[in-house]
Image (tube, rainbow, N blue to C red):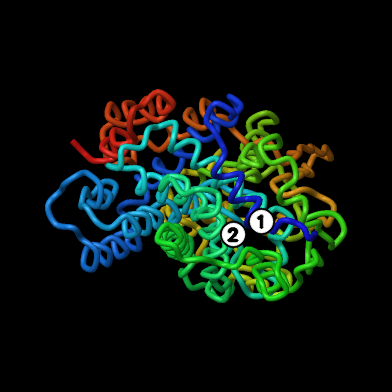
Amino acid sequence: MGKTPLAVQLGEFVARLRFEELPPAVVDKAKAFVNHAVTVGLVGADNARTAAARRAVIEHESLGPRRVGAGQGATLWVNGTRVTRAGAAFANGVAVAVNNQCDSYHMLTHPGVLIVPAGLATAEGAGRTGRELLTALVAGYEVQCRCARDFIPSTPAHGFRASPVYGILGCAATTARLLGLDAQGTTHAIALAASFAGSLIEGQRTGARDADFAEAQAARSGMWAASLAAQGFQGAPTALEGDGGFYYAFTGSNKGDLAYTFTGPPKADLDEIVADLGRRWEVLDVKFKIYPTPGFNQPVVWLASEMAARHKLAADEIEHITLEMNYLETLYPSPRFPRPQAPDGSGFGRTAYMLAYTVIAGDYPVLERNVEDPRDAGASSGAALAARVAALQRRVEIIGAVGRECFAPRLTFALRDGRRVTGEYHGRELMWDFARDAEVLRRFVPGLPISAPRYDRFVAAVAGLDKAPSVDEVVRLTLPE
């Protein structure tokens, strides 16, 4: 007898998962997912691309006067307009993604951009409790992270953006759970999502900004996959590992052969996707981003800030800076299709710029514009600071190391007096719990579209989700008074 298909095993896991079975650390992490996604979504609400997404949804999917209840859609954060649930997930997802401050799993996937907006949109007004939302979010994150873990680098090597490709699976799982689908229905939701998956890296490679919408569009498709499964539509049980399935399409092999890996040999075991379900929790490995820059720069900024303060580093005393990081972090979005360097010689994400700026200023502003586009970087800094940053940036050397973990930079400062100062991360430093993430997110309060007291009530509501009879209060508190 053959193996039980992966989608079937994942569907059974999602359908049988119970809140009472979740370890406290996992529940805490799920609350952090909500708090982080919505907070950065509030900050991103006034971005021009967010506004464009919101206008498009309102034009085509508005539901008229505000009403709450089954069949009445969901709320656009900050704006308050009622639109279709999929439309709300799309527009709110763009707000989460647009400033590059979302969460991150193994650098190239960002579950919170899809799963949190979709989960809140599905649960809002439908009588779902906070515990039901948290359980569904954990289920979706587990599906996405497990399906993505070993295969992430190989997906952009075939021209696809990993985050929406794998995120649609988690989004379908979360939605299916909140819709009350059984194991068979959830299996079909995941299988249909695998068939709906897509998103190219060409935009990121050439400097276009379609990635701001990619996860949000995948969220729509993931929600539709679950909705169609609820109506009896079926997907192939072997949609993931089949000869013509998801892994063959997006990694080039359904046998676990990989084009690239972060570390280790180019071979994955597909059985590991479902190994120890409910006992080993991939959600605990999700990291959080707060700086408006790609994920691989986040630990660089944190480490540089800590070292500059600890060693009282001054730019004019630095002869040379060596940064070692995982080689894939230096060849974004893929070694096969790296983005051309910026005019000043910086690679994608301007890692050397971010490093130099942080050493000189002591930190990087979280409310700065997204620096993914080199034209945006430092736009608000004065001429004197920009000149100092440019001078130090020329003394930065970046080395891509095959053996280093992601989010695990090592910095060495060679000082002009002959001293050398070294520091490093090991990859888990940004895997914060709810309390730590909530503390860091306070830095966003001056840029929020809601008052500080209202934001405090929002954070408290998220912290109490495991006792909340519905999620509606969390959504309501995203609206200005």
* Residue beneath the point at 77% across and 53% down: 271
* Residue beneath the point at 39% across and 42% down: 38
Give the camera-side residue of 203 and 377. 203
Give the camera-side residue of 8 and 270. 8
Give the camera-side residue of 13 and 149. 13
Q: Indicate the amino acid at tag 2.
A: Tyr
Find numbered disc 1 in the image and state the secondary structure of the residue it sits on.
Answer: helix
**Is 14 displayed left or right of 51 in the figure?**
right
How busy is the neighbourhood of tag 2: few (under 14 within 10 Å), some, or many (20 plus)? Answer: many
Residue 356 appears in the picture as rendered: no
> For the N terminus, which image quadrant?
bottom right
Which residue is the site of mark 2? 166
* Residue beneath the point at 50% across and 37% down: 135
Q: Are marks 1 and 2 in contact (CB under 8 Å)?
A: yes
> For the C terminus, which image quadrant?
top left
**What is the tally of numbered marks visible in this picture?**
2
The label on residue 148 is: 1
Q: Indicate the amino acid at tag 1.
A: Ala
Indicate the position of residue 145 as horizontal and vertical percent values.
Answer: 63, 50
Residue 319 appears in the picture as rendered: yes
The label on residue 65 is: none
Give the camera-side residue of 358 and 110. 110
Whichever of callouts 1 and 2 sits on the residue coming sooner in the sequence is 1
Q: Does 245 appear above or below 460?
A: below
* Residue beneath the point at 78% across and 44% down: 412
What separation in Å lies between label 1 and label 2 (alpha carbons)? 6 Å
Indicate the position of residue 303 as horizontal and vertical percent values.
Answer: 66, 39
Find numbered disc 2 in the image and state the secondary structure of the residue it sits on.
Answer: helix
